[in-house]
Amino acid sequence: MEVRDQAPGRHRSPDTAHAPGRPPGQHRSADDRQVSAHPSGQHRAVDVAQFPARPSGRHRERDRPGVSASRPARHTRDMPERPDPAALIAGHAVVIDMIDSGGAGLPALARLLEVVGPAIGAAGTVFVEFTSTGGRVVAATGSAEWAVGRPVSPTDPATVRLLAGPRVREVDVARLPGPFADELAGHGLRRMVVARAEIGGVTVGSLHAFYPDGDDSSGAGRHEMVGYVASCIAQIYGDQTGPPAHGDGPVVAALADGLAVADRDGQVRLWNPAAARVTGRSAAEALNRPLPFPLPEPGQGLDHRLPDGRWVRITSGEVPGPATLRVVTLRDITEQQLRDEDRDLFVAVTSHALRTPVTVIKGYADTLTDHWDSLTEADRREAARIIGQRTNELARLVDRLLTSATDQRPGEPPAPFDLGDALRSAVADLPADLRRRIVLDVPADLPRALGDRQSIATVLIELGTNADKYSPPDSPIELAATITGQYVSFRVSDRGIGIRPEHVERAFERFWQGETGGRRGYPGAGLGLYLVRRIVEQQNGWVSLRPRPGGGTVAEVRLPCR
């Protein structure tokens, strides 16, 4: 896409998720309706008066030349006036075929959102994934595509209200507190139908369908269809055949240790709710069946990895009495195990990343020491230049390692600054080989960003180095800035090997370096994008990656502006 002339934890819910196969019911349309699930499968309308009305301000939208600040969100004209269940079912079948063919993950989720939007006449759709570390928009379509990568705090008042109460509801955006409502209104999105995706009462995500003013988003069947798709997404999570984008599976912290009792043959005789939470296996699935994990000797412990990737610590003891029974306790140690793995990986990656520049520096230093008199002046200068270059790389690597290992990022508190000037200064400080490839496209009237000006150089060198590493050396790297609603943004676009859609979130994980082929052939510690996301989000912004049409990758950073 060309750019020109423009600048934590999961939530429990008392509601039970719909079964994915349950046919949608009928529902009367009205303004400000919520839909809650009943055991019969019917729905009831609930008033949303608890959302206090709030005035909406003016917003700017200048994603491209000629777009008016007051222009409403684009809404496809061939959207159906009424829900189209046949289109939804046909599209859902395509997604099922994708999953059956091994094409799961984010592509399957994005395809499902592309299906549901037109089927219910939505201007845009969004899916927010909730993990043990918080929430994030991992997929979006239509007029809401700009939200991809945006963090969503589970403790934000708007999030709390949306995740409480009925599983499916319709909300007037103007009644929601917080900046996200302003961003939506700035894109012409005034109403939403939201449905929680739940597994056993645990919210793994939420599906949002957005509508502009004047749309009858409460039309018959739309609530049921949104709820149905949210249930299907939850089923994908539960089956571990698709998302989540973060990690290997839902990580739900147990409220207490799991407890089970097994007889002498290893058959389960008791299975408490905590055991069901820890293992993901219900009592009905566990009782009168063999233990689904190895049983250690009495008084001993065993760390075991479950099929979904979580780790449990298993201990056992004998129950006094005539019957030979074993009591088994289960504790979720996933986070501890991940910390241990991170520590081991940190040591391995650090030693490898430090070895290369140190070896080069030592080699040239030894050459100068041992052969000074026999070297020409040009040879000495070249050796000194390389030592200086490698020393700078080493210093930068140490800074990155220290930053990644601490929760505190050095820098100034958020303050207004000239983003255009900061970008131009950062480009001037880039290494010469990288600077020559940059095509700068920053408008002079860019509004002031709110954040840490000094961090822009760090963010740009990480994104620029990434683009330089994965693209041909003679191809341009485009740096363009613009304003979108209440955010000012800049994009770094290349024409390199690109990024697979299912990796656009994993790329921000610490030490992640891609699959075994392709990107594995490139050097690096896997820290750059991880640091970029931390730095940007500490300034109330967000960063995202996406494949570039025609090949390559686009990295986009958004910061609040004033």
Image: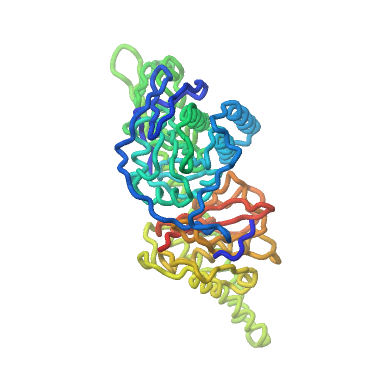
Task: Tell me the quarter of the picture where residue 259 sits.
Answer: top left
From the viewer's perspective, is 173 left or right of 382? left
From the viewer's perspective, is 312 left or right of 89? left
Q: Position of residue 389 (x, y in %)?
A: 57, 74
Q: Quadrant of the C terminus?
A: bottom left
Residue at the extreme top of the image, as rendered: 322
Q: Residue at x 53, y 72 (%)?
A: 424
Q: Position of residue 382 (x, y in %)?
A: 64, 80
Q: Quadrant of the N terminus?
A: bottom right
All told, the count of numbered labels is 0
Task: Tell me the quarter of the picture where residue 41 sits.
Answer: top left
Q: Residue at x 37, y 42 (%)?
A: 159
From the viewer's perspective, is 552 left or right of 318? right
Task: Kindly tell me whether residue 2 is visible in this rendering.
Answer: yes
Task: Tell me the quarter of the picture where residue 428 sits.
Answer: bottom right
- Coloring scheme used: rainbow
In the rendered image, the vertical position of residue 268 relative to residue 517, given as above or below: above
Q: Position of residue 220 (x, y in %)?
A: 48, 27
In the rendered image, the vertical position of residue 400 relative to residue 548, given as above or below: below
Task: Kindly tell me whether residue 307 is visible in this rendering.
Answer: no
92 or 172, which lies in front?
Answer: 172
Q: Position of residue 537 (x, y in %)?
A: 43, 56
